[in-house]
Amino acid sequence: MSSRVKKSGSIISVSIDWYELVLQPQKSGYYAEAFAMADAIIDHELESLLRQIYSNFRCQDLINEIELLRGKIEFYGLRLAEILKNKTVINEEFLQEIREFKKARNIVGHSIEREYALILHEELSKANNQEEYDKLAKEKANEWLIKGFRIFEKLLSASGLIYKKEDFYFSEEFFKENPRGELIKRNFPKDRKKTKGSKIN
């Protein structure tokens, strides 16, 4: 079997295959592994988008430092998504989809009940016996993994939308259009002169 992670000189590349990494364990009933890999792929794409707009080598170095801290602090994944939302690469609705998927992933990954923990209390009445209960848990897990794949597809699309437009996210035009537009007063005070003792608000 060929390796998914390849090294060429100092360059490390990773081949992303949703079928191999997520669907195969999903079809085999290994839902914890499927959720973990789906979440890892989503984080990988979030990082790729961040690297795309923060392309300066100093920014890349900071992202590398953050990546090295993954698993040690509660920063990765969702925090990257929130940065991308602030930059308007993704919107609040999409950010909420990512939040909800990560919540489901944590439920499966950190609960002794695994995929069964995804079943809501009000849904228990749908299962009258163990067979139906098993089926319901499988359906819930599959529904969430489909949502994860849709998030993955949207992130891939976002990369194409910002291609060759990376400078826009650091321009005066961006800060004027951005919902956080008041930042322009601090970041682009070009039309105002600061005299000694005065403050720029």
Image (cartoon, rainbow, N blue to C red):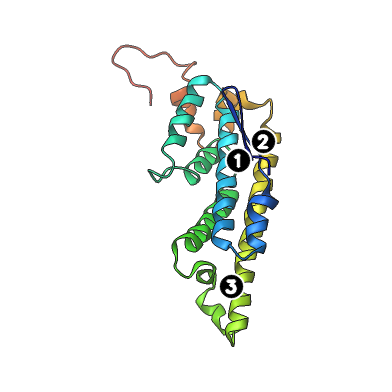
Which corner quadrant holds the N terminus? top right
| Residue 152, x across and y down, in percent | 65, 47
The residues tagged by marks 3 and 2 sit, at their Cα atoms, a distance apart of 34 Å
- Labels 2 & 1 near each other (Cβ < 8 A): yes
Point out which mark residue 45 bears: 1
Residue 69 can be seen in this image: yes
Point out which mark residue 159 bears: 2
**Residue at figure coordinates x 55%, y 25% from the top left:** 170
Q: Would you say 160 lies left or right of 131 here?
A: right
The residues tagged by marks 1 and 3 sit, at their Cα atoms, a distance apart of 28 Å
- Labels 3 & 2 near each other (Cβ < 8 A): no
The earlier-in-sequence mark between 3 and 2 is: 3
Give the residue at mark 3: 137
Secondary structure beneath disc 2? helix
Secondary structure beneath disc 3? helix
- Based on the displayed image, in which of its 4 quarters is residue 140 positioned? bottom right
